[in-house]
Amino acid sequence: MKKDQNLKKLLFYTISSAIAVVMVMPFIWSLLTSIKPDAEIFKIPLQWLPSTITFDHYIEAFESVPFGRYLFNSFYLAIMGVLFNLLFGSMSGYAFAKLKFKGRNVIFAVLLAAMMIPGVVVMIPQYIVLNNMPLMGGNDILGQGGHGLLNNFWAVILPGAAGSFAVFFMRQFFLTLPDEYMESARIDGCSEFRIYWNLYLPLTKPALATLGIFTFQAGWNSFLWPLIVLNDRSLYTVQIGLQAFTFDKQTAYGPMMAATVVIILPVIAIFMYLQKYFIEGANFSGIKS
Amino acid sequence: MKLSNIGRAQESTLSLGSASKKSGFNRYQSRAAYFLIAPTLILFVIFMVIPIGMAIFLSFTNYDIISTMSWVGLDNFKRLMDDAILWQTFRNVGLLTLFYVPLMIIISLLLAVLVTQPFRGVTLFRLAFYMPTVTSAVAASIVWLWMLNSEYGIVNQLLKYVGITGPAWLSESGPAMASVIAVTLWLGVGGNMIIYMAGIKGIPAQLYEAARIDGASAFKQLIHITFPMLRPTTLLVSTMTIIGALQIFDQAYVLTQGGPANSTKTIVYHIYTTGFEQLQMGFASAQALVLTLTILIFTAINFKINQSKD
């Protein structure tokens, strides 16, 4: 029995370590490449560790492409996405969980059903809607003449500002909170909005944190939609900038890895610091069925 | 008899009273509720309801932003038949899905089994397996681009140690597809592992105890207890994986640019090219509609398969 247990242990550590190497190696390898002199990057057989640590590739990456600007843009878009989703998601989540009103179940079901619709089907129409947004970007009241909200950060922020997932996530959390606070607050003459804002919202901090981290990660990593609606170089996000950068510098692997490390790092740092919330969020997407 | 009648009358007036009071109260409550859901609903209508209607409408037009739009009936759908690249991307994605979805389920389930073992250091492994999930597909593709470089890449260099000459991963069609699948798996298994972990924790321990008493091996327990008990989880994971696989874009765009010779071009990539590079938005809408239909059909089939096993 004891022997059996030891064998199992050995098997567990061998398999897990082997997989862990595969999962973590790309991070380590990109970091190592980014601090190696060029001669050591292109070496056969490969040289694992750099003989001297150099930051030249980082300097080159930041000098040839305004990654500072891109970092700011991505950060701004991700934060705005978080703020809007937390606000609108919690507002509607609270209403669907705690208030009674006509059409509640139907509206909620429609919102949920929308989660099943593949993003690709609304990609082109959303672009046209943004292009024809009345009175925006040189458009007249009928939405003609200008470029609407295209090439504007709002083109990224607005379509994702109140995701169905955020609403659903917050609703599930509000459902777990008791109704009693609401009832006694009403007797005290508290307004419905203040009951939501002052009483219930502060109780959802863990849920807000989880949702916030998930929304941030999704915003930071999103690529296709910003690529479609942001054409101005000064509005590029890190993902678009990184892609364009590698397209221009096909074989400059040193600067390429330096740029990649800079872009992966913020999310990894947040993940390491707040892993508990990441796991909870991933868990939730399993419960939603 | 009389008394009870009176009682009932009283009861009804009472409930009437409370009902009218309630409905007055409800009106106030629903006004607050509508106020709270208004931003979500307005955005939902503008960016979801209207676009879905437009998607169907546009696919019957020749809309291209520049010239005037006209109704072309079923022309777009007739053109789809001759769109050789579209069908190639369907074949590519079909092949990708065929390998990617089963591998995703098997690997993420095995990872979940591993990280729910009661050994020391297991949280560290959990962390390592989940780490790729937080990186972007673009960054991951670029790192793998370098790792899969045929001459200097770490993969081929390591293969050389064991006497294998690796292929030019990204410029031969078979290996290029394998690379896209591998990178997508690397990115996604961690998330599904967490979902399976939650499922595994929900399996009653008595089942395993009973199996152990009967002398069932660990492998048999996995096949006869763990996997059947996780069927609802598997349904969820496979549904999400299929929907995701049919819409892959980032990896193909960055890792291989759809090449070589369109062999890794995906459907969404083709729609992107048609709609946003060639600006044939009407035609691209028809393509998107076909893809959406495909996704719905596959999701339905997946549900059928997973439920009929019961």
Image: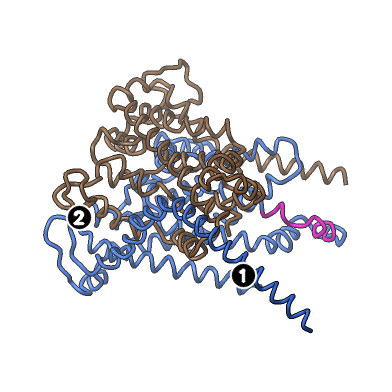
Chain colours: A brown, B blue
Counting other residues with Cα less than 10 Å from the Cα at mark 2, is it few (<14), some (14-19), or many (20 or more)?
some
Looking at this view, is A224 or A149 the one in front? A149
| Percent coordinates x, y for residue B255 in the rendering | 37, 44
Q: Is residue B108 in the magenta section?
A: no
Q: Quote the CA–CA distance across marks 1 and 2.
A: 63 Å
Residue segment shown in magenta: B199-211
Image quarter of the C terminus of chain B: bottom right
Q: Which of marks 1 and 2 is nearer the N terminus?
A: 1
For residue A53, above or below residue B91: above
Looking at this view, is B275 or B218 the one in front? B275
Residue at position x 36%, y 27% in the image: A255
- Horizontally, residue B163 falls left or right of residue B2, namely left
User: Is residue B193 among what the camera can see?
Assistant: no
Give the number of callouts: 2
The dot on residue B279 is 2
Label 2: chain? B
- Horizontally, residue B94 falls left or right of residue B57, namely right
- Dot 1 and dot 2 residues touching (CB under 8 Å): no
Looking at this view, is A206 or B68 the one in front? A206
The dot on residue B80 is none
Query: Mark 2: which secondary structure?
Result: loop
Label 1: chain? B
Q: What residue type is labelled 1?
A: Leu
Image quarter of the N terminus of chain B: bottom right
Residue sticking out furthest to the bottom: B1
Q: Is residue B200 in the magenta section?
A: yes
**In the rendered image, which residue does mark 1 sit on?**
B16
For residue B292, above or below residue B182: below
Query: Mark 1: which secondary structure?
Result: helix
